[in-house]
Image: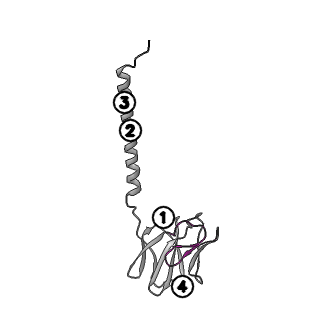
Amino acid sequence: MALQESPDTSRRKFTQLLTMTGFAALAAGVIVFLRTRPKTYPVRAIAQAGDIPVGGFKIFNYPTDVEPCILLRPAEETYVAFSRTCTHASCPVHFRPEENRLDCPCHQGGFSAVDGSVLFGPPPKPLPRVILERRGRALEATGMLTS
């Protein structure tokens, strides 16, 4: 004679399944929220206009004190800045003014000094760009653009 499962056992299993499904949905919602909320960045003065000669550069850290970036001055009134961390293996990139590019010596990657795009090598993505604002003579970093 076969044993019959009691109705209490099936209700208990159903309630457990419903509870676990609810927790999983809540966890998924939290993860989606954390990934899609806009990231806030500090406003930080990184240089004074005119301190860097045309064709020159300055190394600085942004948005934290351990994330190296590079500020370039390609023309009299033009400043651009990028993360200095290669998107391939996190090696520091170096400015090559004669080629107008940023090179990664670790695996021979190259990025445009104009827009941070990958020119050659293994890097999978462009360099993140630092958003700059000029307030009077002060050049301030206000955010990061990543692709």
Mark 3: amino acid: Phe
Disc 2 and disc 4: Cα gap in Å? Answer: 59 Å
Pointer 1 or 4: first along the chain: 4
Q: State the residue position of label 1.
A: 64
Estimate the x, y position of residue 85 in percent, counting from the top left: 55, 67
- Tell which tag, 1 or 4, sits nearer the viewer: 4
Judge the density around disc 4: few (<14), some (14-19), many (≥20) Cα neighbours within 10 Å.
few
Judge the density around disc 1: few (<14), some (14-19), many (≥20) Cα neighbours within 10 Å.
few
Residue drawn at 41 percent across, 66 percent down = 42
Q: State the residue position of label 3.
A: 14
The stretch drawn in magenta includes residue 110: yes
Disc 3 and disc 1: Cα gap in Å? Answer: 49 Å
Disc 1 and disc 4: Cα gap in Å? Answer: 26 Å
In the depicted structure, whether residue 126 falls above or below residue 29 = below
Q: State the residue position of label 2.
A: 21
Disc 3 and disc 2: Cα gap in Å? Answer: 10 Å
Pointer 3 or 4: first along the chain: 3
Mark 4: amino acid: Gly
Judge the density around disc 2: few (<14), some (14-19), many (≥20) Cα neighbours within 10 Å.
few
The numbered dot on residue 55 is 4
